[in-house]
Image (cartoon, helix red, strand yellow):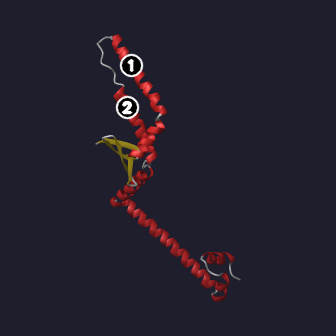
């Protein structure tokens, strides 16, 4: 009688069990299973040795490092929505900085305090107004921005009035250049 475990292993190899039992003896089937297990373990050992050689070589380490960095860049490449949020915050800060400059008043402690209060009032008032308009600002930036996705990083060009802002998004961060 054929060993049921042996038949299951052979059956797992996509053979018809009835066909096998009628054509081959138990010894033939067992020999075939053993040969496939030896071949399988030899293949695993061969692959393991190749991976070990690759990791031990300089080229292999460099390749592995390159693949790791490229994978990290791929998964941290910022999306356009993230860029729009970043650009809206940056634009809001730029507006506040350019409009709410501290006035240069006559020297003296009193006038320095008046300058700080004026500047802070301007910034808080603008911040309140800009907060109410944040969805409009984001929509404007989204419509004014062109994204080029290079998979490991993205390049964004935002056209505002006569300015072109070039931004690179990589590793979840942005670096902006003004043209």
Q: Which residue is mark 1?
A: 118
Left/right of residue 117 with respect to residue 3 in the rendered view: left
User: What's the residue at 33%, 59% (across, down)?
Assistant: 58
Residue furthest to the right in view is 1
Across and down, in percent, residue 156 comes to 37, 47
Across and down, in percent, residue 34 comes to 57, 77
User: What's the residue at 35%, 27% (across, down)?
Assistant: 99
User: What's the residue at 38%, 21% (across, down)?
Assistant: 119
Examine the rendered structure and indicate whether residue 128 appears above or below residue 37.
Answer: above
Which numbered circle lies on residue 95?
A: 2
| Camera-side residue of 18 and 85 | 85
Element under disc 2: helix
Across and down, in percent, residue 149 comes to 39, 53
User: How far, Cα to Cα, is label 1 from label 2?
Assistant: 16 Å
Element under disc 1: helix
Q: Is residue 83 visible?
A: no
Left/right of residue 164 with respect to residue 76 in the rendered view: left
Examine the rendered structure and indicate whether residue 3 appears above or below residue 48.
Answer: below
Residue 66 occupies which quadrant of the picture? bottom left
| Camera-side residue of 113 and 70 | 113
Residue 86 occupies which quadrant of the picture? top left
Task: Rate crowding at label 2 as few (under 14), some (14 to 19) or many (20 or more) other CA atoms within 10 Å.
Answer: some
């Amino acid at each position: 009688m054929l060993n049921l475990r042996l038949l299951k292993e052979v059956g797992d190899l996509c053979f018809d069990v009835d066909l096998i039992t009628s054509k081959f003896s138990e010894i033939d089937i067992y020999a075939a299973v053993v040969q496939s297990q030896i071949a399988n373990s030899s293949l695993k050992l061969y692959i393991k040795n190749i991976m070990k050689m690759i990791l031990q070589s300089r080229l292999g380490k460099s390749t592995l490092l390159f693949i790791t960095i490229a994978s990290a860049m791929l998964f941290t490449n910022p999306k356009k929505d993230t860029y729009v949020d970043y650009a809206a915050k940056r634009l809001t800060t730029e507006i506040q900085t350019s409009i709410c400059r501290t006035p240069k008043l006559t020297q003296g402690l009193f006038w320095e305090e008046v300058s700080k209060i004026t500047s802070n009032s301007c910034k808080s008032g603008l911040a309140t107004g800009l907060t109410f308009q944040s969805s409009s600002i984001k929509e404007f930036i989204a419509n004014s921005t062109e994204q080029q996705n290079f998979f490991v990083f993205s390049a964004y060009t935002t056209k505002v009035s006569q300015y072109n802002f070039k931004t690179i998004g990589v590793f979840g961060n942005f670096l902006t250049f003004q043209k």
